[in-house]
Image (cartoon, rainbow, N blue to C red):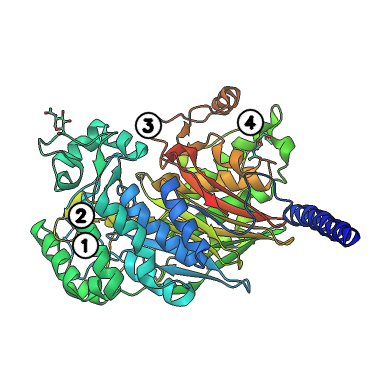
Amino acid sequence: MAKQKTWQVCCLLGAGLLCAVALICLCIASFVNKGCSSGTFQHAAVSADSQRCSEIGRNMLQQGGSAVDGAIAALLCTAVVNPQSMGLGGGSIFTIRDKAGKVKVYSSRETVPQSFKANLLNDCPTKLALTTGSQWIGVPGELRGYEKVHKQYGKLPWPKLFEPTIKLAREGFPMPQYLGGLLSNDMIQKLVKGSSLRDLFCHKNKTVLSNGDILKFPKLAETMETIAAHGADALYTGKIGHDLIQDIKAAGGTLEMEDLHSFRVQVEDAWTVPLGNTLLHIPQPPAGGAMLAFILSLMKGFSLSPNSLHGDQKIQTYQRYIEAAKFANGQRGSIRDPVFNKGKSAAHLVDSDFVDRIREKISTNRTHDDSYYNVTPSTDRVGTTHVSVLDKDGLAVSVTSTINQIFGSGIYSPKTGIILNNELVDFCGRADTVSAGEQPPSSMTPAILESMSGGILVIGGSGGSMITTAVALSIINRLWLGMNLTDAIAAPVVFVDAKNNLNFEKGFDTSVIDGLKALGHRKGEWPYFFNVVSAVEKEHGCITAVSDNRKMGQAAGY
Ligand SMILES: *[C@@H]1O[C@H](CO)[C@@H](O)[C@H](O)[C@H]1NC(C)=O
Ligand SMILES: *[C@@H]1O[C@H](CO)[C@@H](O)[C@H](O)[C@H]1NC(C)=O
Ligand SMILES: *[C@@H]1O[C@H](CO)[C@@H](O)[C@H](O)[C@H]1NC(C)=O
């Protein structure tokens, strides 16, 4: 009896020990399997321009959603957390790479309505300014875009994607710090107080909301609830559309129900451009992908390495970048909607012969007059958001979305809760005429890069004219100059504006600034560095996600 007890105890102890050993083994095994350092993710990640929206996107992925589900949920959230940047009244461009490696672009960028103001381009601003007014409203395609990509790649039910944002919009949430900062700016206060936006962003006593106040979007919550239940048709053929058109007309706009009815999402294969051991996938014109590819292809030929940032080589590296950006400015006119501009094509910008020819014209010891780069004066703009997502099955989504400038046209539709875009301003300085149905040219460039070794970088940015700068420099820093993704995005930029003046972000190396001035460059007075990049990268099985500190963003993953 006693012996049997001892035997049982031994057994138990033995089993316990075995269990412990097994557990330790499991731990080691999973550790070795993961091998991902802290701060990186094993399965999937979302990088939106706010922590709240990155997390909402991540939660969708954890509930079995695809990268497209995560991206849509994060965008819907961004429409309330950064309502100045994007929303249902705007448009977007998705670049999507599927598991098999096929890359497609879904563009729901706004179009010119059938009827539009005569001599519209006479109203173009001549300097950097918020350009408000109903004449600039393009047909909003945002929601048709979500519908299309969700049908193709979605795994969660459509209504589920709206749930967290409806709750936020209805119950309210503390004023996001970034938006609170914008709303304290004089120019923006003037816009908000002087327009229907005051319904959303002012107290009853007409003072503008600030940090510490609660932000609510009750009408938008209702609209989203209807769209969640009845689909995009509620906006494009149904009552929400009729209400929206009524509000636009009341504000003097020309959009008709027929414009909403006839809106179609454009689906095309992405353009793919080789950059050494890396393939760059970009959206075709009128998106800004060709500009990004042009600059990166020029820079690829200079065989950059981490040494290119050492000593005087750093001046040389930026000199080359700036010259490349000046040639890119000279090409701004070639980015037009190909359907409406038969003679114009941006295809040469991704043609290696043309790129090689231009690279030979880049001087290392001087700069040139604007005519050398074929630059005609135009204006710059600010705005937009970007979301990058990579899911556990390898679906990659890079989406840039916008209502164009801060608060778009400055017109809020009280019946629907939707803020309307001023996308038609994008023709200014880049076109002499516009056609009904045409998409305005854009700087937006949601990109996906893949390396021969299987690495993926999903990246894009916001900041209007600064998008190309922000994305190009981040990619150059990451790919060739030896920076990790965080540093690549955080590094101060030099923005070559539409007049070919150099504008240096705070913190830019002053010895390089002096070196560049000595080469003859002009300095500009660009006041706003709204350049913001969101990226997700997978390398050796581990995922890094970075959302730009400039907009106080934070990525999320698991
Ligand atoms: C306006 O109303 C808000 C909220 O009730 C209050 O905090 C603020 O002090 C008021 N401002 C003025 C100028 O009355
Ligand atoms: C710049 O370099 C070119 C080619 O090396 C040379 O011919 C030219 O004199 C140099 N110009 C200046 C201003 O140093
Ligand atoms: C990125 O690199 C910098 C400089 O080498 C380093 O200080 C930082 O910790 C790195 N960040 C990450 C997330 O690895």
Query: Which residue is located at x 24 percent, y 69 percent?
Result: 226
- Pair 4/2: label in front: 2
Query: Which residue is located at x 58 percent, y 26 percent?
Result: 509
Residue occupied by mark 1: 222
Judge by depth and name the residue closer to the eye, 269 or 205: 205
Disc 3 marks which amino acid?
Pro
Question: How far is mark 1 from mark 3, CA to CA?
Answer: 38 Å
- Pair 2/3: label in front: 2
Question: How far is mark 2 from mark 1, CA to CA?
Answer: 7 Å
- Pair 1/4: label in front: 1
Judge by depth and name the residue closer to the eye, 136 or 209: 209
First along the sequence among labels 1 and 3:
1
Where residue 201 appears, as percent x and y from the top left, is: 20, 42
Q: Quadrant of residue 18?
A: bottom right
Residue 527: numbered disc:
3
First along the sequence among labels 1 and 4:
1
Q: Residues within 10 Å of mark 4 (few under 14, many from 20)?
A: many
Residue occupied by mark 4: 315
Above or below, 406 relative to 235: above
Would you say the residues marked 2 and 1 are in contact, meaning their CB atoms lie under 8 Å apart? Answer: yes
Q: Could one spot residue 441 in this view of the protein? A: no
Q: Residues within 10 Å of mark 3 (few under 14, many from 20)?
A: few
Q: Residues within 10 Å of mark 2 (few under 14, many from 20)?
A: some
Query: Which residue is located at x 43 percent, y 59 percent?
Result: 335
